[in-house]
Image (tube, rainbow, N blue to C red):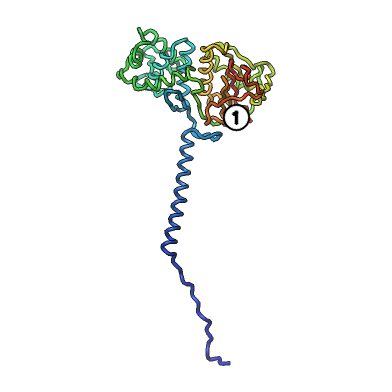
Amino acid sequence: MDLGTTKRLPHTSRVATTPSPRRRGGLALGLSALALVSVLGVVAAAVVWWNGGLGPLVGREQCTVSTAGGTVQLAPEQAQNAATISVEAVRRGLPQRAVTVALATAFQESDLLNLPHGDRDSAGLFQQRPSQGWGTFDQITDPQYAASRFYEALVEVPDWQHLAVTQAAQAVQRSAFPDAYQQHADEAKLLAAAFTGHQAASVSCTVHTDAVPRQHEQDNGLTPRANRLRDAVLSTFGKLAQGGIAPGGVTRAQASTRISGQAVDLIVRPYSDREQRRAGWALAHWVVARADDLDVAVVIFDDHIWSAARSPEGWRAHTSPSGAATDPLSKHLDRVHVEVVQGV
């Protein structure tokens, strides 16, 4: 063996390959398409969330008022205040025109928000001033009281029903901007028609069903949440006939209300009376507008149902669990049925 020579192994090398221009173009195009799909997915999800959600998927909490005259979207607080202003007029027996004037005024003065401050000592929905005799600060920042005081002043204006909205509002408010109220007249008219019950199934809110603890029935057969709802209804609407309440609770046959103590029936009779039906829808819309802060789970009236769990769908046709499609009681023609959240 020749020890003086070294045997070298064959040398191999890895040659780097560069994709062809066609392959590079296809890869870039695929990545761009994937990025575009991702962006579109994010945008679509954002749009669904902004519009309140889809089906059982609840997005942004908001309220939508839709009538033949158009659609207005409100934040939950705005909807609650619009409902309070409207039902105060209903309770007083005032016409829809009064609500239109009041809502246009509140839009201009506070954007339908219960403001704790304003110009000088102004506060509340209508920016009323304690120094001008409208009431104490605590009173004028109570939406129901503020609406009541506004209507008291409005009905004292001569021929107010036949004045332009801005003229009637200015006669009450005496604003430095007397023509500003008119810009809100159209949306105020739409909201007034819905919240006074002249437009059925026209107010819907999307709400999140937050987890709350389960409650036991109190002496009258209702849970504390149901009693809180009942008290809020009675303090707003006055005396109403009620059903579904009894010591020990009431167990119902309907699938949606088997848990006793969580439901209240607010009676509106005779159901064939047009004004009673309108009053029922004013009540049902008020409850939906207050669904978030009153822990409302279900509202059924006039063969329609709204539920928090499917709130993005709005009002839906109601199918009676008993199958009695022609029974007025099963169709809830004579009662606004309200259930609060059960709890866990």
Horizontally, residue 262 falls left or right of residue 30, namely right
Q: In the rendered structure, which amino acid carries the disc numbered 1?
A: Val
Query: Relative to 3, does residue 298 appear above or below in the rendering?
Result: above
The quadrant of the picture occupied by the C terminus is top right
Q: Nearer the viewer, residue 226 or 196?
A: 196
Res. 109 visible in picture: no
SS class, disc 1:
loop
**Label 1: how many Cα within 10 Å (few below 14, some 14–19, many 20+):** few
Residue receiving disc 1: 212
Res. 164 visible in picture: yes
Horizontally, residue 136 falls left or right of residue 310, namely left
Residue 74 falls in image quadrant: top left
Residue 226, position as x, y percentages in the image: 60, 21
Query: Relative to 150, does residue 5 appear above or below in the rendering?
Result: below
Residue 261 falls in image quadrant: top right
Residue 73 falls in image quadrant: top left
Residue 71, position as x, y percentages in the image: 43, 26
What residue is drawn where x is 45% and y is 28%? 75
Horizontally, residue 334 falls left or right of residue 194, namely right
What residue is drawn where x is 50% and y is 77%? 12
Q: Nearer the viewer, residue 193 or 110?
A: 193
Residue 62, position as x, y percentages in the image: 48, 29
Q: Nearer the viewer, residue 166 or 96?
A: 96
Residue 232, position as x, y percentages in the image: 54, 18
What residue is drawn where x is 44% and y is 58%? 26
How many numbered marks does the figure carry? 1
The quadrant of the picture occupied by the N terminus is bottom right
List the single residue furthest toward the front: 326
